[in-house]
Image (cartoon, rainbow, N blue to C red):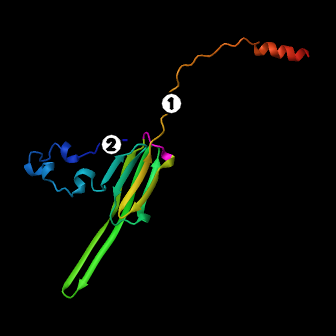
């Protein structure tokens, strides 16, 4: 489940100014999602329980109708369309703020019972319950007992003569 590694373009750029002290990740804003998630990401926490994983995705201000969860192959994709606008008009004062876009993240479902995945959304957090697959018992060698009985072919000959 934890096989995805984020790609950070600034670390692989040969012409980038990696030598700058202010370019160090320590000095970047903790709230800057584009650093660790790209411009189309959102924060996610994954917790392991005894028989499942609990994925918590932060999607503040996103209506439940605008969140999509899909499973394709062994990949869970969470995507959301964000569209919000805030306006405040008063005498000699005008405030307007818009937020629009599409965010999306994908997760490997290896070892997850895909048919039993459930999700709910509360207070801007999407909770996805990912039940672990039950372990398949390994087939072990077994001894077959030899029974002293007539072979099946001999039984067929006896029933024909009757």
Q: Is residue 56 left or right of residue 37?
A: right
Please tell me which of labels 2 and 1 falls first in the chain. 2
In this rendering, the answer to whether 1 lies above or below 60 is above
Residues in magenta? 110-114
Q: Residue 4 shows which numbered tag?
A: 2
Q: Position of residue 128 (x, y in %)?
A: 41, 53
Closer to the camera in the image, 144 or 1 = 144
Label 2, residues with CA under 10 Å away: few <14, some 14-19, many ≥20: few
Residue shown at 35%/54% (left/top)? 56
Q: Which residue is mark 1?
A: 137
Q: Position of residue 149 (x, y in %)?
A: 75, 13
Residue 123, located in which quarter of the rendered image?
bottom left
Closer to the camera in the image, 18 or 148 = 148
Residue shown at 22%/81% (left/top)? 94
Looking at the rendering, in which quadrant would you find the N terminus?
A: top left
Q: Position of residue 74 (x, y in %)?
A: 45, 43
Find out whether residue 113 is within the magenta segment: yes
Closer to the camera in the image, 67 or 132 = 132
Closer to the camera in the image, 39 or 14 = 39
In this rendering, the answer to whether 67 lies above or below 148 is below
Q: Residue 38 shows which numbered tag?
A: none
Residue reaching furthest to the right = 162
Q: Secondary structure at mark 2?
A: loop
Give the prevailing secondary structure in the magenta stretch. loop
Label 1, residues with CA under 10 Å away: few <14, some 14-19, many ≥20: few
Q: Is residue 71 left or right of residue 123?
A: right
Q: Secondary structure at mark 1?
A: loop
Q: Position of residue 148 (x, y in %)?
A: 72, 11
Residue 151, located in which quarter of the rendered image?
top right
Q: Is residue 136 left or right of residue 6?
A: right
Find out whether residue 36 is within the magenta segment: no
């Amino acid at each position: 489940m934890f096989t995805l590694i984020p790609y950070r373009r600034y670390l692989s750029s040969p012409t980038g100014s990696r030598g700058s002290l202010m370019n160090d990740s320590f000095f970047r804003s903790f709230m800057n999602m584009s650093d660790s998630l790209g411009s189309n990401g959102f924060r996610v926490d994954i917790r392991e329980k005894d028989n499942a994983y609990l994925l918590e995705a932060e999607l503040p201000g996103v209506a439940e109708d605008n969140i999509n969860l899909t499973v394709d192959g062994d990949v869970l994709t969470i995507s959301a369309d964000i569209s919000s606008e805030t306006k405040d008009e008063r005498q000699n004062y005008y405030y307007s703020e818009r937020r629009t876009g599409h965010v999306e993240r994908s997760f490997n479902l290896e070892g997850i019972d895909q048919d039993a995945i459930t999700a709910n959304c509360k207070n801007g957090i999407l909770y996805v319950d990912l039940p672990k697959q039950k372990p398949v018992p390994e087939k072990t060698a077994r001894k077959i007992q030899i029974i002293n009985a007539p072979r099946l072919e001999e039984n067929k000959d006896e029933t024909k003569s009757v």
